[in-house]
Image (tube, rainbow, N blue to C red):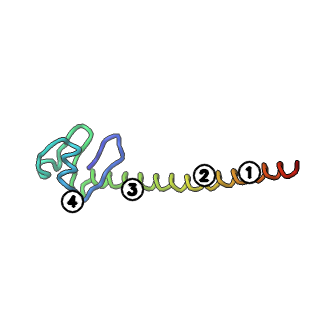
Amino acid sequence: MILADVRPLVITERNLRHGMIKMWSGSYEPQDMCVGTSLDKDLMVVHSGTEAYETAKQLKDLFQEFTSHQRELYKKFSVEEMTILQEQQQQQLNQITDV
């Protein structure tokens, strides 16, 4: 499935459920009737192995790599922030004991 202007989704047939199609499209059509057609202007169901599928899969992989990178940056930031806060607390304690 490809969602325009949103992160791409790649859902294999064994993971695809009619309820997911119904939820996104508001439609009760059988899955086979939706394949290869646009459900609305932002959602399209494509077959595995097609160029559109490969593009969506590459975009999904890139998005996952990006979010993983963001998580790692957040972890590093948290550690650095904790270190700075501990140093500040230690300095404050030292100032109090020096007085």
- Dot 3 or dot 1: first in sequence order is 3
Compared with 29, 54 (above or below) is below
The residue that disc 4 covers is 13
Q: Is residue 60 left or right of residue 2?
A: right
Marks 1 & 2, CB-CB < 8 Å contact:
no
Q: Amino acid at mark 3?
A: Asp
Q: Provide residue 37's location: percent of width, then percent of height.
A: 17, 45
- Dot 2 or dot 3: first in sequence order is 3
Rounded to the nearest angstrom, the CA distance separating label 3 from label 1 is 42 Å
* Mark closer to the observer (2, 3): 2
Rounded to the nearest angstrom, the CA distance separating label 2 from label 3 is 24 Å
Q: Which residue is at the front of the view, 82 or 22?
A: 82
Within-10-Å neighbours for mark 1: few <14, some 14–19, many 20+: few
- Dot 2 or dot 4: first in sequence order is 4
Q: Which residue is at the front of the view, 71 or 40?
A: 71
Q: Is residue 38 left or right of residue 3?
A: left
**Residue in the image at 27% along x and 39% along y:** 42
Rounded to the nearest angstrom, the CA distance separating label 4 from label 3 is 18 Å
The residue that disc 1 covers is 89
- Dot 1 or dot 2: first in sequence order is 2
- Dot 4 or dot 1: first in sequence order is 4
Within-10-Å neighbours for mark 2: few <14, some 14–19, many 20+: few
The numbered mark at residue 61 is 3
